[in-house]
Amino acid sequence: MRISQHLLVFISVLSLTRAQTATVAATALESTVAPAENATTSAAEPWIAPAIFYPFRSAAGDTEHFLTGDESYESVALSTPYTFFGRTYNSLYVHYNGLLTFNQPEPASGPNYNPTRGAEDFIAPLWSDLDDMGWMGMFSYQQYTNGSVLTRATQDINQYFPQMNFTASWVFVVTWDYVDAVDMNSFIRHSAQAITFQVVLISNGSLSFFLINYGDCAVIYDQVEAGYDTINSIDHFVIPGSTNGYSVSNLRNTSNVNVPGRWAFSANSGLESIIGVQIRLTSFSDLTQSENIEAVLLRIKQDLFSRGLSSSIQMKLREVKKTQP
């Protein structure tokens, strides 16, 4: 008769992050988060951005760019170099179409579906032909090297990646805001349907991370995608549910860090982390047979992918410890 036992499995994971390493079962699980409140307000009330958003717009001292042309972008010189999966950049390109590229601007109006296996490093918080929607739109950005924003970024990264003992020295915040409005008052107050999202780049000079925050996201009747990709797609990820314009309104309820509307990622290559996964098996021999080991690792990897883990990671069994049931 077999006795059910608890085994603590230690797995070596390359390029693994805390945001993708919450204790998981060996079967794929669907993460659920509580729905956020609708941020759209009536014209008589001032609009308040979701609490997960970092400060933005002119009130925060941002540089603002209102939509001026089709497939337009702005080049931004970085005060501190930012390393994105092994490549270091001193500038980047912010596109009105919900895209941030590093090594070159992207001429396409809509997404080249990830993985592109192309020649670009990019973050696509919500890549679509937003500048052809006929809405009022803008993006704003600011770089920080001191103050409360760095304190907040440090706290966020240490919460999601606690093994790093991280202290932020530079933060870049860029926010896109589109409203189906024809006058500035309606735009500022979000008195019509809106699409608002944000990217936060965070670095300490050697380690790099980024956050994607979602507020209101109206239905998009065009191709759309959210995630990130790298040159030759060595590292890439697509946020689940982001490739259907009818379902992007739910992005504000999704997360890989149990914070509705927020996705957190490491942009570091070649890091090795050790995680413990507690699973229930029918016998100790279940993990002594190579075919069973590979099956268990595959199922764990699939679950971690769904929580934002880069597709390029490698996993191997380091140690198995038998614990009391």
Image (spheres, rainbow, N blue to C red):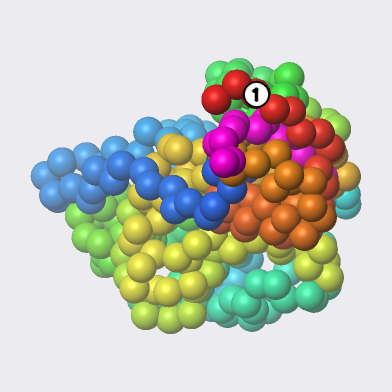
Magenta segment: does it hold 9? yes
Which residue has dot 1 on it?
A: 323
Q: Is residue 157 left or right of residue 317?
A: left
User: Looking at the picture, how far across and down is residue 180, in whole percent?
Assistant: 28, 66
User: Looking at the picture, how far across and down is residue 94, in whole percent?
Assistant: 63, 59
Residue at 18%, 47% (x, y): give it.
Answer: 41
Q: Measured along the vertical axis of the image, is residue 4 above or below residue 103?
A: above
Tag 1 secondary structure: strand
User: Looking at the picture, how far across and down is residue 39, in whole percent?
Assistant: 26, 46
Q: Is residue 1 left or right of residue 186?
A: right
Give 10 or 13, whichever is nearer the viewer.
10
Q: Measured along the vertical axis of the image, is residue 320 above or below residue 20?
A: above
User: Looking at the picture, how far across and down is residue 126, in whole percent?
Assistant: 51, 63
- Span colored in magenta: 1-18
Magenta segment: does it hold 129? no
Report how many numbered discs are placed on residues in the image: 1
Q: Measured along the vertical axis of the image, is residue 204 above or below residue 63?
A: above
Give the position of the N terminus as an image quadrant: top right
Q: Quadrant of residue 74?
A: bottom right
Q: Is residue 268 left or right of residue 9?
A: right
Residue at 45%, 38% (x, y): give it.
Answer: 258
Residue at 43%, 81% (x, y): give it.
Answer: 222
Would you say residue 149 is visible in this rendering?
no
The residue sitting at the front extreme is 1
Q: Quadrant of residue 226?
A: bottom right
Type of amino acid under label 1: Thr
Question: Mark 1 packing: few (<14 Cα in 10 Å), some, or many (20+)?
Answer: few
